[in-house]
Image (tube, rainbow, N blue to C red):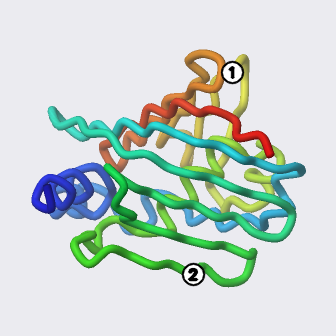
Amino acid sequence: MRGLIVLLLAAVMAGCAGQATRAPASAMPALALSPAALGGTLALEQRLVFEHGQRSDTVDALVEADAHVVRIVLHRQGQVLLRLAWDGKELQQERAEQLPETLAAQRVLADLQLVYWPAEAINQALPAGWQLRDEQGVRTLFHRGDVVATVQKTGDNQARLENLREGYRLHIRSVPVRP
């Protein structure tokens, strides 16, 4: 199982050796938006299906966000792979020993924010040359006119993020957690 987790996480996120030569280091902006920029709260249980090339695998996540902090826990079959907390200033993380360095907590946070934070907040935080359009349930992230990533709502509490520059798709099924 340890080998499967390493293989899954190494393959699905940016930083694979083959991807590094095709995409510049600035392939995706590090959003790092404040938790308050969400404008509300999130409490979700998620099933995440990662696809990279012909590979596909599934992990689960717990996501909590309020005006003060964003917390994410990635786990598989009861084993915590990554735990992160973002307070708008510092990104803290706890990583499983077998988790490859290519799975960056910053990338996980940026993907979460690309899917859920308001488009206006994202656009204000993007560096020069970047733009997010949010039209009819589809978000499109552009860099100098080129499509870099898309986020499409695929149903109630479902979305698909496709990162074209870094070569992966993330299918998200969420269930709201109620106190």
Name which residue lies at 51% across and 60% down.
73
Q: Is residue 53 left or right of residue 36?
A: left
- Give the numbered dot on residue 92: 2
- The extreme left residue here reads 3
| Amino acid type at image mark 1 | Gly
Q: Which residue lies at the image location 48% right of the left edge and 57% below the top edge?
A: 28
Q: Quarter-wise, where is residue 162 in the image?
A: top left
Answer above or below: position of 118 versus 16: above
Q: Position of residue 14 (x, y in %)?
A: 32, 58
The spot of residue 54 in percent (x, y) is 15, 32
Q: Earlier in the sequence, mark 1 or mark 2?
A: 2
Quickly name the residue at label 1: 137
Could you tell me the amino acid type at mark 2? Gln
Vertical order, 83 against 126 (above or below): below
Looking at the picture, how far across and down is residue 19, in whole percent? 23, 56
**138 or 46: nearer the eye?**
46
On the image, the x and y values in percent for residue 117 come to 74, 47
Q: Nearer the viewer, residue 119 or 176?
A: 176
